[in-house]
Amino acid sequence: LKRGETFTLLRLDAPQCGERVPNRMRRIGVLLLYAFWVANNVRRIVGISCDVGDAVDAVYDGDGLFHAATIRSLDLSLLAPEVTVDWDDASPSYRTLLFANARKSGVACTALVVGGQVFGLTTGEPGVLVVTGLDISSTIRLLITDSLETCGDLSATQHTAVSIPPGAGIGADVINFFDVVVDTAGIYKVCFWSGQSVGGLGAGDVASYATTLGPLTVVNPTSTTTTTTTLAVPFSRRRGLSYESVSLSVVGSKGSVYEGLTANPAAWNVHLPGGVAKT
């Protein structure tokens, strides 16, 4: 089951008081208890999802102690992801730290989406952006901004080159955003919103997209040039014969070209691509 989903447990002929519990029901009971244990303990092994706006404990750079804080932004494009927090004690020092140095409810933080993702599109053509995560759904949204902007800042708006921005995605855990169009080649930045409202902000608020996913590279379409080369046709004077003069006419698609050639004792050759020769 995923977080937030429900299920129905079917009744399996429960025994009456004093009756012996069938082996089949014992096995089912053991499996349910084991599944419950796994669901509640596996997160302590792999971590717990932490998102923008979550209350966490984080380590000050240098003191090695955890202090209460709130996540302001995440950068998952880095090899070692970083988190920016606001300390509950309002201290401005060491606000950006390694994501690995944050925890929630005593459990190490992990990201909702896979870090280090890269994206690519072709200029002016509808393309697909694919986002992968362990606990995401079609409620997530993307924003494409300038590569020099910081996701979540009020200046990190949708880039003007984006003629068709990402809409609602399709899928679960692997979300596809279809028909995204960017009209200018270049490097952009993809910002992410999990769908979790922070301070009443939603999909229409730039501040919601405070998680950096990775770069988007937009390239111009590949053009193909076809060149046709016609084989050369040789023309030659036969050695030993006497010519007072020779006239060569080349007939092509744009008309005729004439060139006068004076005979001499030595043999001569003319190599011209295509055409019809007249003497």
Image: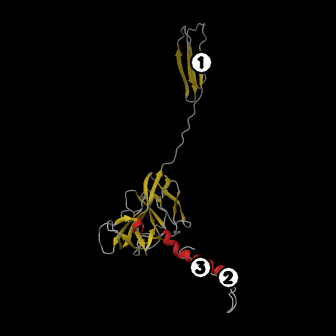
* Disc 1 target residue: 235
Numbered mark located on residue 25 in the image = 2
Work out which quarter of the rendered image holds the C terminus and state it.
top right
**Front residue of 104 and 217:** 104
How much space separates mark 3 and mark 2, taking CA atoms?
12 Å
Figure quadrant of residue 239: top right
The disc, 1 or 3, on the residue closer to the chain's N-terminal end is 3
Q: Residue at x 47, y 64 (%)?
A: 142
Which element type, helix, strand or loop, lies under badge 1? strand
Outermost residue toward the bottom in this view: 17
Image position, residue 167 (x, y; %) = 50, 65
Amino acid type, mark 3: Leu
Q: Residue at x 62, y 77 (%)?
A: 31
Q: CA distance from mark 2 to mark 1?
A: 99 Å
Q: Is residue 50 visible?
A: no
Front in this rendered view, residue 41 or 53:
41
Q: Is residue 13 left or right of residue 44?
A: right
10 Å crowding of disc 3: few (<14), some (14-19), many (20+) = few
Percent coordinates x, y for residue 179 in the rendering: 53, 59
Q: Above or below — where is 155 with respect to 123?
A: below
Q: Which mark is residue 33?
A: 3
Within 10 angstroms of label 2, few (less than 14), some, or many (20 or more) residues?
some
In front: mark 2 or mark 1? 2
Q: Secondary structure at mark 2?
A: helix
Distance between the alpha carbons at the discs numbered 1 and 3: 95 Å
Who's the residue at 56% across and 18% down the image?
A: 270
Q: Quadrant of the N terminus?
A: bottom right
Left or right? Give the position of 45 relative to 236.
left
Question: Residue 40: where, in percent of width, then height?
Answer: 52, 76
